[in-house]
Each structure stands twice: as structure tokens, then as C-alpha cells.
Image (cartoon, rainbow, N blue to C red):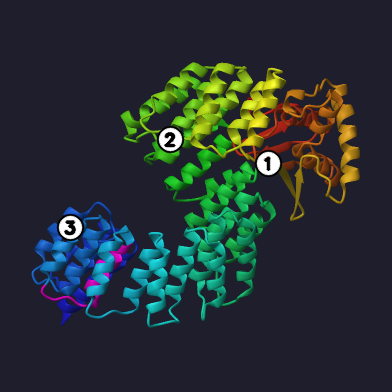
């Protein structure tokens, strides 16, 4: 009786270690056991079914089991499928003399997870009996694979119309396909909802660039006392805050994480850190980073990227070196952050060194994002010819954004030859995108070629190309105030215009000269200057100045790259108003203080 109790207790210990992902400790307990039964072997084998890349070890362990049962076979099936070994899984499944419904479901779930839906459909049809796991697997598989018609068909056929997992799988499928209204309709019709259902809607909204709707959904969710947010909930909500630069709500979620005792969760900590970085609060992100006890690669990447986006290239590189000292291996995302840091700090030679070391030293194959960073870095240094050579040497088709980067540099360096080459390539790749036309017109305008500017605009009109409107926004006391160039609808517009006039006089008194090349309208200089002063960035800054106390840092956000004249004006305003201004555009953060910008005027 005594030894049997020991076996039972040891089995429980092995299973507990496996549940926590600690396979070495599970293996130690297993090896120290004086006696083992089939449950012992199965418990350890389950550990390999959760670890990718350990199939060979799982096969060796399985071969040692004295009397494998159906659970042993099912667990080994999971190992094959986890490692995408469809042929091995099929061979083992066909050889099994005894199969239960779990055997069939293991195969079906594996095929569905991998996306082998033809095989999954065939297996599902052949199943002697099906349960709710079977229906969930097939519906989820089709939904994930984007075959929404097949998912809907099996959803309608499922016998249990109250199965919340089935409904949630369909919601996720609709969201993945961008069909937000259908997902919303299904969510509203659900007979019962659980946390996963709420999370699926929240994540779907954020993924589909509907962060505002996602955060409304999150607030509604908090009203239901039976639905307690988990790390996944807070992570999605914080990503929504990041996308909207909703710092006030992000801080409330930070407090909620404390209240729910989730603040030590690494996913929540990293999401909070990322939110603070993207809302311009780098110091708060650093405090969080320092407080995270166990930092994984995602945590390190988020902080390195935060430093990079804020223009602190040297600090980003120092953190990268600290990460390596901790024994954390960099991945492809790390190198995007590191190369961005080199780019924003103008560290050309170091950037080239890191780019060349990726494959050689770390086994990381450079991807499109890495090449884009290098092109931007070379362009920043004025090496446009080398940038073009790098683009042409890429082992894959260059992304249009790379040519957009080159176009932007052509404006700064006044290179007509490369500008027309880059514009042509963007138009070939994205014929309906306004980006190439607008950037090429900007290059012409910078060189006072107004006839060419007119020709580009005429071409846009003939081809029905519509430019995405630029807008800026500022959050004050939890309310977002959005401005477009020449805005006419804000309720405090008269006060804003008064402030703009005052700003213009004071800036000119200390040396500000409007850069009229940033206005592409064919009008007189006075009119151009007026239009420049009413760009969305300046309107948002003016509103911030009249709406906050002296000394308050202003945080302004723009949906496109910041206008060069607005960038110059923000430097002067930080000096004469004695304010720090943080302006985030699509590329980076610009910290204006005492007449200078963190980007070094690039």
C-alpha cells in the first residue's frame, strides 16, 4: 500500500510540473521514482506534447512505456501534431487498434490548428461519434482558415446551439475576416457569454482599427460583475489605448491591474509598458520595465523599441547589450527595434554592423522590416545611391513603403533622379495609393517646380486618387479633440485662431520663417502662410496651450508624418512658451524642448 501511495504522490508532482511548463523538474521526479505505472509515463509524455521541437524525445519515451494505453497513444498524437508532423500523426492514428473519441478529437484539433482543413473535413465526416469538442474544433478550424462559409455551415449543423465556444469561434472568424458588423450581430444574439466571448470582440475591434469601439466594449464589459477581466482582456484594452494614445484610460487600466492582482503578470506588465511608450510617457515605461522580475524577449523588445521610437538610440543599444548579457537571444523583432534605434540616432556604421551580424552571429534572416530600416538609415546619411543598391539587392520583392522612404529622403536631399524612380515603383505596386503622388509633389515643391506639382495633382484627379486627410488630436481630461487642416468646426475655434496669430508674431520675432514649400496650393505667399499656420498640428498645439496650465507638457498625435514646417514651428514654440511638446506621428516621437527636437531635425 505504501509504495502505491508514493507512486500516486509522485504522479501528482510530475503532472503539476508539466502543467507549469517545468519539464526538467518533472523529469527529475520521474527519474527518482522507484516504481512507475502507466499514469507516470503518460504524465511525463504530456510534457513533451506541450513543447515544440521535442518530438524525437517524445518518441523515445513512448518506446519505453511497458504497457501504453489509449491515453499514451493520444498524447503521442498530440506531439506529432504540435510539430506539424501530419504524416507521422496519420501513420500512428491508422496503426492504433483502439481509438476513443479523444483520439479522433486529437487528430481533428491538430489538423484544424495547423490549417489542414481538407484533411480535417475528411476526418470529421469519418468520425463514428462526435461531441462538443469535435464541433468546436471543426468550426474553429474553418473560421481560422478564413473559410467562413464552411464555418457557418458546420455552426448551423452543430447540435448544441448553446455552446459558447462555438459562438465565440464564429465571432473570432468574422473579426479575422474584417466582418465586424456580423461579429457584433452574433455577439448580441449569444444565448450565454463568457470572458472569452467578450475578449474575442475586444481583440477583434482593436485588430480591425476600431480601437474606440473596442474601448467602449471594454467599459461595457466592466459593468458585468460576473465577467472578471484577465491578462488577455487588459492586454487588448491597453493596445487600444496605445492606438488612440488614450493615456488617461491607460492609467485607469493600470490601476485596475493592481486591483485585480494582475500587475505582476508579464503579459499585463509588458502591455502597460508598451502603452506608456506609445503615449509618450517613457519614464513610466522604464519604471515598469525595472519592476518586471522575469523579463522575456517580448518585454525586452518593447522597451528597446520604446527607446528607439523616442529617439534615445544609445539607450536602446545599451539595453540590447544588457539583454544579451542576461542570456536572452534576440529575434527578428529585436533587430527591427535595434536598427530603428540606429536610424533615429543617426548611427550609420553601427546599424550596418548589426544588420550584417543578424544572419552571421544570431541566425536571424533579414526580412522586409530590417531592409526598410537600413534604407531609411542610408537615406538619412544622404547615401541615396547606396539605398537604391540595397533595395535592388533584396532577396524578395521590396515593399512599397521602402520606396516611400526613399521618396521622403529625396525631398530632403533634393534628388529629382531618385524621386521619379521611387514614385514610379510605388505607383506600379499601389496604383490607387495617394502616397507616391503626394510625396513626389512634395519633392517638386521643395525645388519650386510648381508646374510639375500641378501636373502630379492633375494626374491624381484623372486617376481618381484621393489623398488620406491628415489630422491631429490631443487628449485633455479624458476627451479627445481632433483637428484637420483649416478646421472650421471646433467650438473654440475663435480662441484658437487668436492664439495662432499670437504664436506667429512671437515665433517670427525670434527667427521663425515659414517654409512655404510645405503648402502645395497654387496661391499667393500670404495665403500659403495662412494655410500653413492652420495645419492640424499647429491647431492642436494652440488648443493645448490655451487649455492647460503653464508648464504642462503637451502631447499631440498625428495620423501621418509631421509636416516639416509644423516641426520647425514646434521647436520655436517650445522655446517661447517654455513648454515641452511631444508630437507622435506614424514614424516616431518628436520631443521638443527649449527650441530643440530629439530627432536631430531629420
Q: Earlier in the sequence, mark 3 or mark 2?
A: 3
Q: Is residue 328 left or right of residue 194?
A: left
Which residue occupies the foreground of this view, 452 or 571? 452
Q: Is residue 498 visible?
A: yes
The residue where tag 3 is placed is 87
Q: Earlier in the sequence, mark 3 or mark 1?
A: 3
Density class for disc 3 (Cα within 10 Å; few <14, some 14-19, many ≥20) is few
In terms of secondary structure, where does tag 2 sit? helix
Give the quadrant of the C terminus. top right
Residue at the front extreme of this rendering: 462
The residue where tag 2 is placed is 368
Q: Main secondary structure of the magenta part?
A: helix
| Magenta-colored stretch includes residue 107 | yes
What's the distance in space between the residues labelled 3 and 2, CA to CA?
33 Å
Q: Is residue 75 above or below residue 206?
A: below
The residue where tag 1 is placed is 558
Give x and y (percent) for residue 492.
87, 48
Density class for disc 1 (Cα within 10 Å; few <14, some 14-19, many ≥20) is many
Q: Are marks 1 and 2 in contact (CB under 8 Å)?
A: no
In terms of secondary structure, where does tag 3 sit? helix
Amino acid at each position: 500500500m505504501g509504495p502505491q501511495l508514493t507512486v500516486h504522490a509522485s504522479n501528482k508532482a510530475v503532472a503539476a510540473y508539466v502543467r507549469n511548463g517545468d519539464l526538467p523538474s518533472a523529469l527529475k521526479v520521474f527519474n527518482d521514482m522507484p516504481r512507475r505505472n502507466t499514469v507516470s509515463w503518460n504524465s511525463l509524455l504530456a510534457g513533451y506534447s506541450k513543447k515544440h521541437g521535442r518530438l524525437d524525445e517524445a518518441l523515445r519515451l513512448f518506446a519505453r512505456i511497458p504497457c501504453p494505453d489509449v491515453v499514451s497513444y493520444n498524447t503521442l498524437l498530440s506531439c506529432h501534431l504540435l510539430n506539424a508532423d501530419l504524416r507521422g500523426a496519420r501513420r500512428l492514428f491508422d496503426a492504433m487498434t483502439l481509438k476513443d473519441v479523444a483520439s479522433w478529437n486529437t487528430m481533428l484539433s491538430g489538423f484544424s490548428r495547423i490549417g489542414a482543413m481538407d484533411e480535417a473535413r475528411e476526418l470529421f465526416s469519418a468520425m463514428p461519434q462526435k461531441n462538443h469538442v469535435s464541433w468546436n474544433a471543426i468550426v474553429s478550424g474553418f473560421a481560422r482558415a478564413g473559410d467562413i462559409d464552411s464555418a457557418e455551415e458546420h455552426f448551423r449543423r452543430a447540435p448544441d446551439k448553446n455552446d459558447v465556444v462555438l459562438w465565440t469561434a464564429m465571432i473570432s472568424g468574422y473579426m479575422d475576416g474584417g466582418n465586424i458588423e456580423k461579429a457584433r450581430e452574433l455577439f448580441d444574439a449569444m444565448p450565454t457569454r463568457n470572458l472569452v466571448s467578450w475578449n474575442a470582440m475586444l481583440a477583434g475591434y482593436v485588430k480591425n482599427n476600431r480601437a474606440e469601439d473596442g474601448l467602449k466594449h471594454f467599459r461595457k464589459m466592466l459593468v458585468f460583475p460576473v465577467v472578471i477581466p484577465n491578462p488577455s482582456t487588459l492586454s487588448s484594452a491597453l493596445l487600444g489605448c496605445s492606438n488612440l494614445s488614450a493615456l488617461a484610460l491607460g492609467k485607469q487600466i493600470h490601476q485596475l491591474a493592481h486591483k485585480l492582482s494582475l500587475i505582476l503578470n508579464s503579459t499585463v506588465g509588458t502591455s502597460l509598458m508598451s502603452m506608456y511608450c506609445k503615449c509618450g510617457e517613457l519614464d513610466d515605461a522604464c519604471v515598469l520595465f525595472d519592476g518586471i522580475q522575469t523579463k522575456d524577449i517580448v518585454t525586452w523588445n518593447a522597451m528597446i523599441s520604446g527607446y528607439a521610437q523616442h529617439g534615445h538610440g544609445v539607450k536602446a543599444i545599451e539595453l540590447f547589450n544588457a539583454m544579451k548579457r542576461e542570456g536572452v537571444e534576440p529575434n527578428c523583432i529585436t533587430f527591427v527595434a535595434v536598427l530603428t534605434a540606429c536610424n533615429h540616432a543617426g548611427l550609420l556604421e553601427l546599424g550596418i554592423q548589426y544588420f550584417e551580424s543578424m544572419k552571421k552571429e544570431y541566425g536571424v534572416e533579414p526580412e522586409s522590416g530590417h531592409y526598410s530600416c537600413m534604407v531609411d538609415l542610408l537615406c538619412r546619411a544622404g547615401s541615396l545611391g547606396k539605398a537604391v543598391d540595397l533595395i535592388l539587392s533584396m532577396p524578395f520583392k521590396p515593399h512599397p513603403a521602402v520606396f516611400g522612404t526613399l521618396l521622403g529622403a529625396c525631398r530632403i536631399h533634393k534628388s529629382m533622379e531618385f524621386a521619379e524612380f521611387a514614385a514610379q515603383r510605388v505607383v506600379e505596386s499601389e496604383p490607387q495609393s495617394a502616397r507616391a503622388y503626394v510625396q513626389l509633389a512634395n519633392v517638386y515643391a521643395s525645388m519650386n517646380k510648381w508646374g510639375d506639382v500641378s501636373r502630379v495633382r492633375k494626374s491624381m484627379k484623372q486617376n481618381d486618387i484621393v489623398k488620406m486627410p491628415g489630422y491631429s488630436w490631443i487628449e485633455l481630461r479624458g476627451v479627445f479633440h481632433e483637428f484637420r487642416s483649416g478646421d472650421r468646426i471646433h467650438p473654440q475655434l475663435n480662441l484658437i485662431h487668436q492664439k495662432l496669430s499670437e504664436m506667429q508674431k512671437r515665433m517670427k520675432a525670434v527667427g521663425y520663417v515659414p517654409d512655404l514649400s510645405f503648402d502645395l496650393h497654387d496661391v499667393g505667399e500670404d495665403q500659403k502662410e495662412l494655410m500653413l499656420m492652420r495645419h492640424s498640428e499647429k491647431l492642436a498645439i494652440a488648443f493645448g496651450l490655451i487649455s492647460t496650465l503653464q508648464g504642462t507638457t503637451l502631447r499631440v498625435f498625428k495620423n501621418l508624418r509631421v509636416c516639416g514646417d509644423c516641426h520647425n514651428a514646434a521647436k520655436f514654440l517650445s522655446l517661447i512658451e517654455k513648454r515641452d511638446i511631444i508630437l507622435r506621428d506614424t514614424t516616431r516621437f518628436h520631443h521638443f524642448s527649449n527650441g530643440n527636437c530629439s530627432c536631430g531635425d531629420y
